[in-house]
Image (cartoon, grey):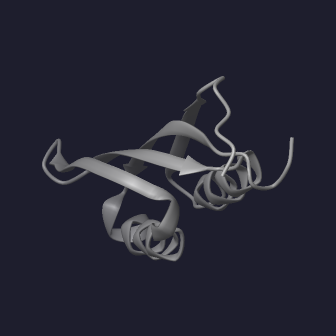
Amino acid sequence: MSQTEKRYAFTGIIIQEREKSASAVQQIISEYSTIIMGRMGLPNIDNGKLSIITLILHANTDEIGAFTGKLGRIDGVTVKTGISKTIEPE
């Protein structure tokens, strides 16, 4: 697969301990904003102890992996991603 072949994907992000992790998550999301097509979130679940963000991505698999890898290294953050099988040449 070449670097220009893109796929659609969704990424689910669960943030526990918002006060410790939310700013780091937002910084990475901003860094990768060019691959994010849509965002939906529930920022204040269980009296502010939990946040859930769902993102729709359009990128090559290397970009998706780099993005989700950075998110997954943040303490208190869980990330799961589903990637489409359909490849779109750019």
Residue 66 visible? The answer is: yes
Viewer-nearest residue: 13 or 56: 56
- The residue sitting at 75% across, 54% down in the picture is 4
Expressed as whole percent of the image width and height from the top left, the position of residue 9 reads 53, 37
Q: How many numbered marks, from 0 up?
A: 0
- The residue sitting at 56% across, 35% down in the picture is 81
Quadrant position of residue 30? bottom left
- The residue sitting at 69% across, 57% down in the picture is 63
- The residue sitting at 73% across, 46% down in the picture is 5
Quadrant position of residue 56? top left
Expressed as whole percent of the image width and height from the top left, the position of residue 77 reads 50, 51
Quadrant position of residue 87? top right
Above or below for 77 versus 79: below
Above or below for 54 versus 29: above
Instruction: Specify the quadrant that holds the N terminus.
Output: top right
Expressed as whole percent of the image width and height from the top left, the position of residue 43 reads 20, 53
Which residue is the extreme one toward the front?
A: 90
Residue 50 visible? The answer is: no
In this rendering, would 47 be left or right of 59?
left
Expressed as whole percent of the image width and height from the top left, the position of residue 11 reads 48, 41
Viewer-nearest residue: 35 or 15: 35
Above or below for 12 versus 25: above
